[in-house]
Image: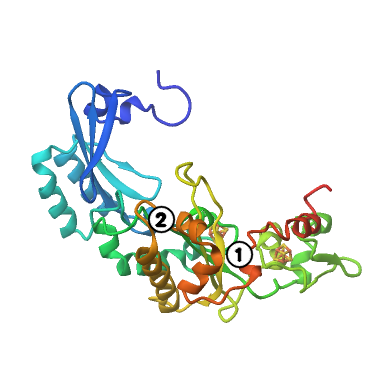
Amino acid sequence: MPGIGIPSLASSLPPIVKRNYGRWISHEHPRPGVIKHDSESGEACFTVRAAMPPNARVSTSTMRMLCGLADEFAEGFFRVTQRNSIEFIGVPEGRIEELIARLAKQNFPVGGTNRSLHNTTCCTGYMHCHLAATDPAAIMKAISEMLHKEYTTDCLPAKLKISGSGCINNCGEGSCADIGIVGIHRDLPPVNAEKLKGCELPLVISVCPVGAIKPKGPGMVEIDPKKCIHCPACSVACAAFAPIGSPDGDGVAIVVGGKAANTGDGPAIAKMVIPYLPNNPPYFPEITQAVRNIVDVWVANAQPDERIGEWINRIGWEKFFQKAKLPMSFRLVDGYDARSLEYAKANVRFRW
Ligand code: SF4
Ligand code: SF4
């Protein structure tokens, strides 16, 4: 039955997965970037994982090349993981090294498993989002190059996930990664009186999460600079508030200690540790150096299997800031706990 919606799962499964569906009993990592799954049937399934480009964007010719490798080495199937890696599943054990060499020739590094940097991910940012304050894909490329060894070897205390978002809407989920790069605007949105005529003022006013937009005479509004948190919500609702941001004002914040999984200390929202770094393409040295510093301090001090947030939970945030030589402020690490009441009262969507 074709059914309605996405293609059936059964048509997308490699034969070895179909044969052993639900019968897997264990897995191990024979080498970085390779996972071996053992089935109760006695079969072993080898998976080779390689990093895709930021935001998993590839041309049709690259996709054809990858499809060719899947045909040759993995019975014609592959999958793209949640972190934008490509996995060739069911590779014969004796052909793993050959596949890795073929991928390396095409600049697709194999790794991202076990105690390594798992592939970096990000939202679309400048590529086609009008709200972006930075270019997360370019930043992820720069970070991936800097941490190439960390991706291709198991040299870290635990897995490391780095995610980027072009603005504080956080579509790239930086706040639930070990290290998150989050684009920030620092300028007030423009208010274009002509374009405002095409928008419903009550809607425009109510869309602001902190009540910063106020009526100012007939058909006009003003923005309270003390309240505005530079989220792009008004810019989405009405063209009068676009484009938001400026080359000099925009940049990124660094957040650390986030985690989505229920393992270890459980899920956590990352806390901001660096409030602003400038956009400095193409290699974003301020951002990559900040990430390098946090990774190095974590590697030097964490116990085996401690993700960054778990390590910080053990030693405390104050010590983290000392070890990372970062200026500490309660505004950075309060995690919205101490001021949650203040925030909740300020949010016009929250009915008190
Ligand atoms: S996080 Fe911001 S820049 Fe990135 S896709 Fe979402 S809205 Fe656009
Ligand atoms: S919606 Fe966001 S950017 Fe617009 S005025 Fe409110 S806080 Fe500022």
Residue at 30% x, 49% y is 114
Residue positioned most to the top: 1
Looking at the rendered image, the quarter that the N terminus falls into is top left
- Disc 2 marks a residue whose amino acid type is Lys
Q: Which mark is residue 333?
A: 1
Looking at marks 1 and 2 on the same chain, the residue that comes earlier in the sequence is marked by 2
- Disc 1 marks a residue whose amino acid type is Val
Q: How many marks?
A: 2
Q: Estimate the spatial distance between the alpha carbons at disc 1 and disc 2, rounded to whole Å.
A: 20 Å
Q: Which residue is mark 2?
A: 161
Query: Quadrant for ligand 2?
Result: bottom right
Name the residue nearer the viewer: 48 or 57: 48
In the image, 83: left or right of 63? Answer: right
Name the residue nearer the viewer: 36 or 237: 36
Residue 107 location in percent, x, y? 22, 61
Contact check, label 1 and label 2, Cβ < 8 Å: no
User: Could you say whether the residue bearing mark 1 is in a helix, strand or loop?
Assistant: helix
In the image, 300: left or right of 243? Answer: left
Residue at 65% x, 62% y is 334
For label 1, count other residues whose C-alpha is less than 10 Å away and answer few (under 14), some (14-19) or many (20+): some
Residue 296 location in percent, x, y? 36, 69
